[in-house]
Image: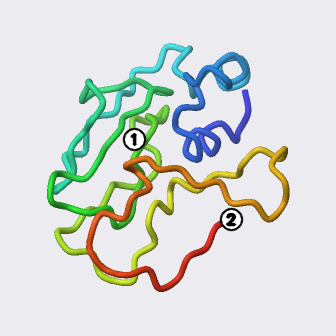
């Protein structure tokens, strides 16, 4: 229905199935969310040093596939969550993981999202979860937030 559906899904791969966007997504992006008969499917790209964390190695348009770096490798770039397009290609880019990241490193660059507007200005929201921990030894030389 809308030309921007593939762009929305590329930016937010869980758009078609997330509890807060699912109803709207399937109403305005029914083809991109896999509600029309489309013969395309997407498969695991089998990228080196990367493991798929979602259960299936084959998904339909609008569904998403998740990835993480293999043990002993560190995130460098790419998308940890990718949705299947109507053309049978995964949206976004392959996850790139290296044994020793080249420095300096932007950690969790893909995890940065706009926060709710109810937060006061000049407030940082910091969480202690594994995805936000620095995974190797060194020192922080620059810190910023959006």
Q: Which mark is residue 76?
A: none
Q: Quadrant of residue 24?
A: top right
- Mark 2 or 1: in front is 2
- Residue at image x 18%, y 51%? 70
Position above or below: 40 against 8? above
Q: Position of residue 118 (x, y in %)?
A: 84, 44
Which of the image's four quarters has the C terminus? Answer: bottom right
Residue drawn at (68%, 60%) of the image: 124
How many marks do you count on the picture? 2
Q: Circle 1 — which element?
A: loop
The quarter of the picture where the N terminus appears is top right
Question: What residue is shown at x 84% (from left), y 60% (from top)?
Answer: 121
User: Is 96 on the left or on the right of 78, as rendered?
Assistant: left
Q: On the rendered structure, is 49 left or right of 77? A: left
Q: Which mark is residue 89?
A: 1
Horizontally, residue 21 falls left or right of residue 14, namely: right
Position of residue 25 relative to residue 128, above or below, is above
Vertical order, 37 against 143 (above or below) = above
The one nearer the camera, 78 or 102, is 102
Q: Where is residue 134 drawn, in percent x and y? A: 36, 65
Residue of label 2: 146
- Residue 48 at x, y percent in the picture: 16, 56
Task: In the rendered view, tell whether residue 94 sits above or below residue 45.
Answer: below
The one nearer the camera, 81 or 70, is 70
Residue 116, image x and y in percent?
Answer: 77, 44
């Amino acid at each position: 229905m809308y030309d921007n559906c593939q762009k929305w899904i590329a930016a937010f791969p869980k758009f078609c199935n997330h509890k807060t966007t699912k109803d709207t997504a399937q109403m305005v992006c029914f083809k991109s969310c896999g509600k029309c008969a489309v013969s395309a499917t997407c498969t695991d790209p089998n990228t080196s040093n990367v493991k798929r964390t979602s259960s299936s190695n084959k998904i339909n348009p609008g569904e998403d596939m998740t990835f993480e770096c293999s043990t002993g490798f560190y995130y460098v770039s790419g998308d940890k969550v990718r949705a299947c397009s109507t053309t049978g290609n995964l949206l976004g880019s392959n996850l790139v993981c290296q044994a020793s990241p080249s420095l300096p490193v932007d950690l969790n660059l893909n995890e940065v999202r706009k926060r709710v507007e109810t937060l006061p200005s000049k407030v940082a929201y910091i969480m202690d979860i594994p995805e936000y921990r620095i995974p190797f030894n060194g020192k922080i030389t620059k810190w910023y937030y959006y």
